[in-house]
Every structure is written in C-alpha cells, then in structure tokens.
Image (spheres, rainbow, N blue to C red):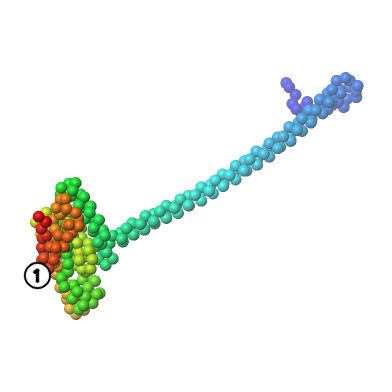
Amino acid sequence: MKPGAAELDRRITELLADPAYAGHPLREALDALWQYTAEQMSRIERVTQLSDAYQSMAHERELGLCDQFDRQLRRLSRIARISDHYQNMMRDLNAALEETSSRDPLTSLLNRRALMEMIKQEVQRASRSGESFVVAMLDVDHFKAVNDQHGHETGDRALVELAGALVQSLREYDLCGRWGGEEFLVLLPNTQPDAAQHVMDRLVGAVRGLAVQASDDVLRLTVSIGMAHHQLGETFSETLSRADQALYLAKQDGRDRVALGFPKR
C-alpha cells in the first residue's frame, strides 16, 4: 500500500533529522529535492489560490452581467410596451383624424370632400362592371326663412333632424352627406332611375313628416331633389352637373318634389 502524503512527509523529515545519515551522499540530494518540492507545492498553492480567486471574480462578474442583462431586458420590455401603447394611440388618433376629416361636424354625415371621393370611386367601378348609379342633390326649401325667423340654432337643429331622416329613409348600401349649407347629396350605387325614384319619394315623405320644435312653434320642412343617372363614359362632374340642373327644375316646378336630369344628346 502506497504511503499517504502526510506519512511520506513524516518519513522524509525523520530521515533528514537522523544523525545516522549525516554525510550520506543521498542526504544532500534528498534535502535539496525536498526543498524544491516544498517550493513547488507552495507555488502550486499560490496558483490555486489565484485561480480560485479569479474564478470567484469571474463568477461574480458573470452574475453581475446577468443582472445587468436582466435589468436591460426589463427596461427594453417597458420601452416596448410604451412604444406599443404609443403606436396604438397614434393609430387611434389617425383613424379619428381621418374620420373627422371626412365627416360634417354638424350632422356627422359625410362631408363634400368624402362624397366627391366616393363618387369618383363609383365612376371607376361603373366603368369596370357596367353597373351604373344615381346621384341625387337635395336642397331644403326656403331654408333662409327658417334661419331668419327662428335663428341659426333652430336652423342647425333642423338640419340635424333632417340628416337623421335621410339616413333612416335610405337603403343600407346607399350613401348620403352634407354637400354644403342646406344642400345634401345622396349616392345610390348600382341603381336604375325607377328604383331611385321610389327611394327619393320615400325620402321626400319622411322630410314632410318631420316636426322640428322652434320655441312655441313647430317647424315643418320640405326638400327639392334633382336626380341624375350616371352614363358610362361620363365624368363625375358631368353627372353632378345634371343632378344640379334637375334640382333647379324641381325648384321651378314648385319645390317639395323630385326631378330627373336627362343625359345630353
């Protein structure tokens, strides 16, 4: 059985201390070897201590870097959440701005700019599919007298109630909006004049049935309507012009009625 390190150390120490081996030629070599071994062991011990210290520092540094990395991840996560929230806010704001830019502030109907864009798209769709549409221009009869006699606040309320009657009288896929002042525009996609006439007659009747409260009085309204059936190859401006001319004819014929603008020959 091989001796352990402690036993070997004890035996060498006894041999070097034994006077019987004084002057022995191997004693000097053993003593030198023992001193050399002790020095090497001391160096190994120092290296081991340094290695342990370095590993401890590296471990602590690694833990520190992990902590820093975790903190950075948490910070980036917060930034990402803030960014997502900001982008959602901007999306909602842009949608609200777009909606506001296309709506009349009084009646909440489409405004003139949005209506013109819709008509342009409908002209393009009609040119591709061959399915035409009808545009109708509406004007509230004697509306200036309403403002003069009852005030602009009553006039605005009358326009709001009229806008509600328009929406209720039209079909689900029809579009309507405020063209300006007391003028409104209705777009009837994929519709022939006969069908459009029925829709407009219903609308005229709905307006007649309105009762707008004006102080101690009840205000009754009527509208004149000019319709134009879009002809293939016609520009949207030409269609609108014919609807406007038909509106003029409805006014001339006594108001509170619908007139159809015929295409140019």
Q: In the image, is residue 108 above or below residue 16?
A: below
Q: Of residues 210 and 196, which is closer to you in this image?
A: 196
Tell me which residue sits at (15%, 54%) in the image: 230
Tell me the quarter of the picture where residue 258 sits.
Answer: bottom left
Tell me the quarter of the picture where residue 146 sits.
Answer: bottom left
Asked if residue 164 can be seen in this view, the reply is: no
Tell me which residue sits at (60%, 45%) in the image: 64
Tell me which residue sits at (23%, 77%) in the image: 151
Q: In the shown orientation, is residue 42 left or right of residue 61?
A: right
Residue furthest front in the image: 265
Q: Of residues 32 and 6, which is closer to you in this image?
A: 32
> Which amino acid type is shown beneath numbered disc 1?
Gly
Q: Which residue is mark 1?
A: 254
Q: In the image, is residue 87 above or below residue 44?
A: below
Q: Residue 145 in the image: state x and y as whole percent.
A: 18, 76
Asked if residue 220 can be seen in this view, the reply is: yes
Residue furthest top in the image: 25
Instruction: Give the quarter of the figure containing the N terminus.
Output: top right
Q: Residue 227 in the image: state x and y as whole percent.
A: 13, 60
Q: Of residues 64 and 211, which is closer to you in this image?
A: 211
Q: In the shown orientation, is residue 127 left or right of residue 26?
A: left
Tell me the quarter of the picture where residue 66 sits.
Answer: top right
SS of the residue at dot 1? loop
Q: Looking at the image, how many numbered discs can be counted on the residues? A: 1
Q: Residue 78 in the image: state x and y as whole percent.
A: 48, 52
Instruction: Give the quarter of the figure containing the C terminus.
Output: bottom left
Q: Of residues 134 and 38, which is closer to you in this image?
A: 134
Tell me which residue sits at (23%, 68%) in the image: 181
Q: In the shown orientation, is residue 21 left or right of residue 178?
A: right
Q: Residue 156 in the image: state x and y as whole percent.
A: 24, 71
Q: In the image, is residue 220 above or below residue 35?
A: below
